[in-house]
Every structure is written in structure tokens, then in C-alpha cells.
Amino acid sequence: MVLLAALVVAAIFVIGWPLLHTAAPEDVVAPPTAAADERVRLREDRDQALEALKDLELDRRTGKIADEDFTVLDAELRSRAAAAIEALERPE
């Protein structure tokens, strides 16, 4: 019974500690900057373009898209992906 009571007190302490503890400056996460938001946008652009390239290649192999259309769309998507990758590789 004493062990159970000790476990209950320990659980209350562990759960309640963050509520009673004041946050130190290193505990607080800084809000994202405009540069960080731009990097996230560039990563999303890159990922979307690469995913679209995979889908486009699959569509070409299965015959859902004509070769002429594939050539145009492939060039556009590769250009978009390359631009995002180049922007991500630039130093901040």
C-alpha cells in the first residue's frame, strides 16, 4: 500500500512539474524567421516537383501521356526542381 501511494505521489510530481516549473530562455523556441519560412517553401517546391516528375514518368511508361506532352512537362518540372535546389544550396 505504501508503494502504491509512493507511485501515485511520484506520478503526480512528474505530471505536475512542467506546470509548476518556470521556463528558462533556452526552453523557449524562437519564432520562425522569414528566411526559415522561405527555406520551407523551397523544400516543398522541390519535393512537389520531384514527385510530379515521378508521376509524369509513370504516366509516360503506362501510355497515359503522349511523348510530345511529356517532353514539355518534363522540362518545366525539371526546371522548377533545379531552381528550388539551387536556391536551397545558396548560403543564407
Image (cartoon, rainbow, N blue to C red):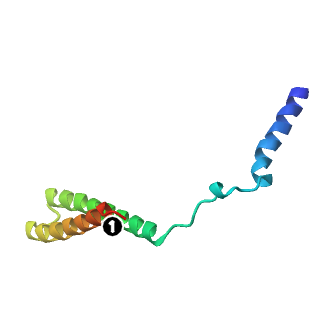
**Location of residue 40 (image quadrant):** bottom left
Q: Amino acid at mark 1?
A: Asp
Judge left or right: residue 22 versus residue 59: right
Pick whichever, 74 or 21, lies toward us. Answer: 21
For residue 1, say whether it is visible.
no
For label 1, count other residues whose C-alpha is less than 10 Å away and answer few (under 14), some (14-19) or many (20+): some
Where does residue 41 sit, x and y in percent of width and height? 39, 68
For residue 88, say whether it is visible.
yes
Task: Classify the position of the N terminus by image quarter.
Answer: top right
**Location of residue 51 (image quadrant):** bottom left
Where does residue 17 sit, x and y in percent of width and height? 78, 48
**Location of residue 80 (image quadrant):** bottom left
Task: Classify the position of the C terminus by image quarter.
Answer: bottom left
Where does residue 83 sit, x and y in percent of width and height? 25, 68
**Residue under the point 30% across and 60% down:** 89
- SS assignment at label 1: helix
**Residue under the point 77% across and 42% down:** 14
Residue at mark 1: 45
**Residue under the point 75% across and 51% down:** 18
